[in-house]
Amino acid sequence: MVTSYNVDAPLDQLIARAREKGLQVPHKPTETLSSAAGGTRIPVGQRPHSVAVSPDSLHLYTTNFATGTVSVIDLEGVAVVDTIDAVEGPYGVAANPNGRHLHVASPGAKRLVRIDLSTGHETHYYLARAPYGVAMSPGGGRTYWTLALEDSVLVTDPLFVEDTEIRDISFPTGVAVAPDESLLYVTNYFAGTVSVVDLAQKTVTVTISVGPNPYGAALSPYGDRIYVAHFGSDSVSVVDTTNLTVTDTLPVAGPRGVAVGHDGTRLYVTNFFADSVTVIEL
């Protein structure tokens, strides 16, 4: 499965839809913007989009947009130990807390993909809609998919038998779930904000200003910090979820996806243009 190395049709569609709505949006980021410093880098696949940490903290998983694959990284050996053929143009990835499954979003193919890590078996669900980002509930009972072209978040069970939808979220791309699953944090790519959704009410209750082009998002283990990757700004914002303000900005080259280690001591950020993942000690 190979996607053109220089083409990112789902992001192009997102920009086109924003312009149709009358928004003044910049051109999509290019390699020339990817010069910021960062922490240690791990080489992965081509055009890594999103990243997830395994429940046992032994592995990282990155979706590689250009090749339609998922890289499996051994965190002890700090190297790719396996490559999984997944789906054309994979974007979001989330590891199920059961330790057996990965969930992958493909906006171009309009598919939700469930990968059994023990057998390699893949189940493809044709959505007829474009899922961009994905997050799992802490207990593994629900999966949250951002439908960036439709201003909504789709909520499904892990087998996609039942679903509901949370609407009126502007161009959502990244998504993260609070540890107690009371809140959902969703990046609004063109608004420079993060929407905080009350999951009981299924409505946006607060909007946090974070800066231009927020893309991926990840919560700390205790939910007191949210890390937001700014694609095109070469930075990751650190947001205090209590006072709802940005408390720090980390320089990272070409950031798109972001994940936090389960002990909260490390941040993992995909470098989309550098085919690597940056590891930052927190």
Image (cartoon, rainbow, N blue to C red):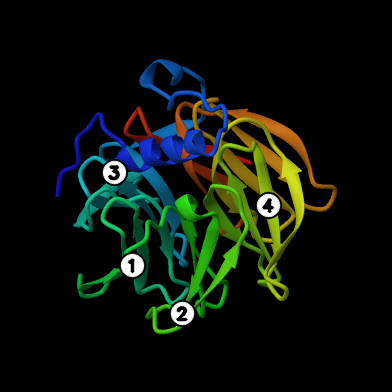
User: Looking at the image, is mark 1 or mark 3 earlier in the sequence?
Assistant: 3
Question: Which residue appears farthest toward the right when viewing the image?
Answer: 243
Query: What is the C-alpha distance between the residues marked 4 and 1?
Result: 24 Å
User: Looking at the image, is mark 2 or mark 4 earlier in the sequence?
Assistant: 2
Mark 2 vs mark 1, foreground winner is: 1
User: Looking at the image, is mark 4 or mark 3 earlier in the sequence?
Assistant: 3
Mark drawn on residue 41:
none
According to the picture, the residue beneath numbered tag 2 turns out to be 157
135, above or below 4, in the image: below
> Label 3 amino acid?
Phe
Give whichever of 261, 84 is nearer the camera.
84
Q: Are marks 4 and 1 in contact (CB under 8 Å)?
A: no
Give the structural element (helix, strand or loop) at label 4.
Answer: strand
Classify residue 31 as left or right of residue 204.
left
Q: Quadrant of residue 64?
A: top left
Mark drawn on residue 195:
4
